[in-house]
Amino acid sequence: MRHLSAIAGLALIWALPASVAAAQTIYVSNEKGNSITVIDGKTLEVTATVDVGQRPRGIALSKDQKYLYICASDDNHVEVLDLETLKVVRTLPSGPDPELFILHPSGNPLFVANEDDNLVTVVDVEKGNVLAEVPVGVEPEGMGISPDGKVLVNTSETTNMAHFIDTSTYEITDNVLVDSRPRFAEFTKDNKHVWVTSEIGGTVSVIDTQSKEIVHKVTFEIPGVRPEAIQPVGARVTSDGKLAFIALGPSNRVAVVNAQTFEVEDYLLVGQRVWQLAFDGEEKRIFSTNGVSNDISVIDVEKRKVIKSITVGRFPWGVVVKD
Amino acid sequence: MTAVQYLRCLRGIVWREALRFLHQRERFVAALVRPLVWLFIFAAGFRAVLGLSIMPPYETYVLYEVYITPGLIAMIQLFNGMQSSLSMVYDREMGNMRTLLISPLPRWYLLSCKLLAGVCVSLLQVYVFLLIAWSWGIDAPLLGYLTVLPALVLSGLMLGALGMLLSSFIKQLENFAGIMNFVIFPMFFASSALYPLWRMRESSLLLYQICSFNPFTHAVELIRFALYGEVNLLALAVVAGCTLLFMGLAIYGYDPGRGMMARRRGAPA
């Protein structure tokens, strides 16, 4: 019934989309296609497909948005793609099997989760050398960094923990036990909470960054969908801290969560096995990678509607948006 | 005959049909409850059935209830088309038809007015249905509610003309129930109203072909595309063609000199 209340604003919103997304570009890593798909943010059409290293998964933009860092998991390194020429210009060491990484808010260094080696590797992207290796739990994956860059949170899939790491000493300061198979960590912009998704547990733990206590566990229930299929993976919280979007894996839904009351407000149907999410700069749209159906879905944040799904390469995994 | 007289006739017929519809509250409720039962009960149970594929005019994955909404709109029009024809059989038995056909205006015009009146009633039903669906979160682009209107008029005319054609074959009211069952259900189920035709093709090629020849399929697709501001040219051509064909035959059928009525006069009761 939310429509009835939205009626007044609807006409206005409906007239807007043309002005949205002036010159945005969306980059998607295709895990099995060994490529990066480039999509025009305005026409929402694929403009290029670039072959890169084997099994590209996590991707991130450099701070100046000129380069794309790519975890080439099976090549055991990070590739740097020049977004002007769409050529891989150099590689960075990463330690074995890099899966997901996060860039320090200052643009350097890069924190890489090495799935097979139970390490977080810290890489200087300027000099191209490894600064430190931090031993963590088994199968590290999720990486979140606080907005001030002081705290890194890594989740280990098998140990079921969120490890809080001090980025100045590269030491683990706290461990928080969460539900089974934590996949992703996302700090809120006010640095108060970190959201950790648990794929098998089917929950999202919201951890207080000061007390390191779990203040809330978000659970999901979708009519007509088996509970086992609800597997939270990617998560994004808007910068105003009001809404969170959670990718729910093989349930093919993205949950819209009120980030203040932690109530799930909506489930949006996207493609199969939805994995990672990325906002555009203005947070008007959020993009989801749908691994099994080989496409990405474009969600209008304000209207909470999936506006389009675009076919990309095989097994899309990571997604970023360049403004 | 002047244009004013033509208009007066049109107004009279449409007004009578509208009054009749509004005064039969049960009919109004029934016309709405039928598709709503499909939407809220049937579609809820089959939510996961549709499978995952993006087909035009949809640009992304849709829930089953979104998929069947155009089919249910067409169902409203199908029932309405048959029901207004049913009223013609009734009119003929009760003698009102004689009053109408005695008018000096040409018969094709009278029958077209009658059809148009039926379409107006169906439009009312469809928009109330769309409003209820919308309040449930099943919506189309705002402009789609406008672009669907011409498609609704055309599909309503086609289904009404079909009903009229059938009613010209029917002698008595009792026989109509049979035709309803033999026409409405096969037409509805052998169409793209409830499932996309590629699904049908997976289980039976013959059924798929039958479905693709069913004019009701094209009415559904015409409405589906129009609801998203698009034109399905094939559907448009088929629906327009069938409308003309059915209408022509119905006018012929209602011609006392040549049509079915003349032939029936000679037949045993």
Image: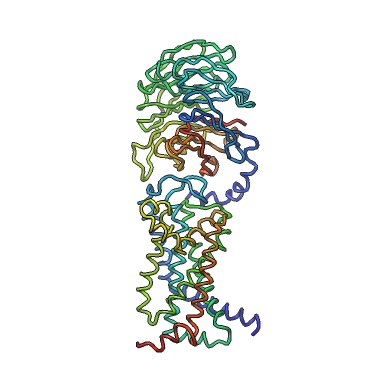
Q: Is residue A180 or residue B73 the one in the foreground?
A: B73
Q: Nearer the viewer, residue A239 or A269?
A: A269
Relative to A180, does residue A174 appear above or below in the rendering? above
How many numbered discs, if any? 0
Percent across and percent down for residue A133 are 46, 11
In this view of the protein, can residue B97 be seen by the observer?
A: yes
Q: Quadrant of the C terminus of chain A?
A: top right
From this view, report whether residue A233 is shown above or below residue A174.
below
B77 vs A14, left or right, is left
Q: Position of residue A146 (x, y in %)?
A: 51, 22
Could you tell whether A96 is left or right of B109 in the image? left
In terms of image quadrants, where is residue A273? top left
Q: Is residue A36 above or below residue B107?
A: above
What residue appears at the point 41 percent right and 33 percent down from the top-left corner?
A: A232
Viewer-proximal residue, B122 or B105?
A: B105
Is residue A106 at least partly visible in the picture? Answer: no
Q: In screen coordinates, is B155 left or right of B4?
A: left
Q: Residue at x 46, y 31 (%)?
A: A234
Expressed as whole percent of the image width and height from the top left, the position of residue B238 reads 52, 64
Q: Please name the colour scheme applied to the rendered image.
A: rainbow
Image-quadrant location for residue B211: bottom left
Compare residues A1 and A323 and report the one nearer the observer: A323
Measuring from the top left, give residue B87's x and y in whole percent: 44, 77
Height in image: A102 above or below B6?
above
